[in-house]
Image (tube, rainbow, N blue to C red):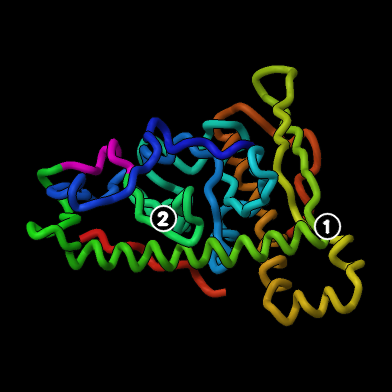
Amino acid sequence: MAEPAANTLQAPVSLTATAHKGLRVKPIGTADHIAKNHFAKIYTPEFSKAGTDYPIIFVKDPDTGVFFAAGMWGLEVNENLFVDGNRWLGGYFPASVRCYPFAVQQDPDNKDRLFIGIYENAPIINKDEGNLIFNDDGTETAWMQEVKEFLVRVFQQEEMTKVFVAKLDELGLLQPQTLSIKRTDSDKNIDVSGFYIVDRKKLEELPDDQYLELRKNGGLEIIYHHLMSLDSLDKLLRKKNEQGVASPAAPAAPEGMEGGASAPPQS
């Protein structure tokens, strides 16, 4: 389950007054930009809210081998079962997606330096309507300053989540998971793999000092939100069934803070 690019968006470029003066950002309005995203990154402060709407899983980046947390939106690549036409029907909207059309990135030449990136070819970027990014004198508008504050909060949450997920990996708690979904339109199954969940048995068998550390730093609560979110796998299966494509062929995964950064200003 490699992370898909946001449809046909090109990579974000550094946002500067010189290159992007006069550009405006329209409210998103539709879910077109995530219609082919079968998952999206989720940060630990969002687990309790997001987990009631869709499963929270862990995915290993094939390039770096590093795990990250994600909300599972589809059972196949390029499938988002929570987008109908261009409407988002998935409930909680992750902070990682609300950053669009911006992104916080590290300077590849200086990891301590961050910059705000922008997806220049995003459909909501234009010169005629929406929120202006830069004033005539090249300074950021009040709207853009609020957006930047939101982006920084999201970046901080992402860094916090990286520490949490790395701890799960260090403790050996992440186990690969495979679901076999029977197609109703053929004799073939859909095998959903490439994602990980917390192994409840290994969690219970942790040494007392490691278990206590998780409890004291809030990690245990986050793990339980993840485990409870796995009940939402049934929602994905039901949505798949509504398409007349699949039904469970094997048991679903075992059972399974405060909300995430608030939405960026749109007007």
User: What residue sits right under mark 2 in the picture?
Assistant: 104
Asked if labels 1 and 2 touch by Cβ distance under 8 angstroms, the answer is no
Label tally: 2
Q: Nearer the viewer, residue 222 or 248?
A: 222
Classified by dominant secondary structure, the portion drawn in magenta counts as loop
- The reply, left or right, for residue 206 in relation to residue 141 is right
The N terminus lies in quadrant: top right
Q: Which residues are magenta?
A: 119-126
Farthest top residue? 186
Image position of 137 (left or right of 215)? left
| Label 1: which secondary element | loop
The percent coordinates of residue 149 (x first, y second) are 34, 68
> Which image quadrant is residue 44 in?
bottom right
Dot 2: element: strand
Q: Disc number at residue 119?
A: none
Q: With respect to residue 77, does 42 lie above or below? A: below
Q: Looking at the picture, does residue 156 appear above or below residue 57?
A: below
140, 263: nearer the viewer: 140
- Dot placed on the residue nearer the N-terminal end, 2 or 1: 2
Callout 1 amino acid: Gly
Does residue 122 show up magenta in the picture?
Answer: yes
Q: Which mark is residue 172?
A: 1
Q: Residue at x 69, y 33 (%)?
A: 247
Q: Position of residue 147 (x, y in %)?
A: 30, 62
Amino acid type of the residue tagged 2 in the rendering: Val
For image coordinates 82% across by 62% down, the residue present is 171
Residue 118, relative to residue 140: is it above or below?
A: above
Q: Residue 198 appears at what percent x and percent y?
A: 77, 57
Distance CA(mark 2)–CA(mark 1): 30 Å
Where's residue 126, x and y in %? Answer: 17, 42
- Asked which quadrant contains residue 83, the reply is top left
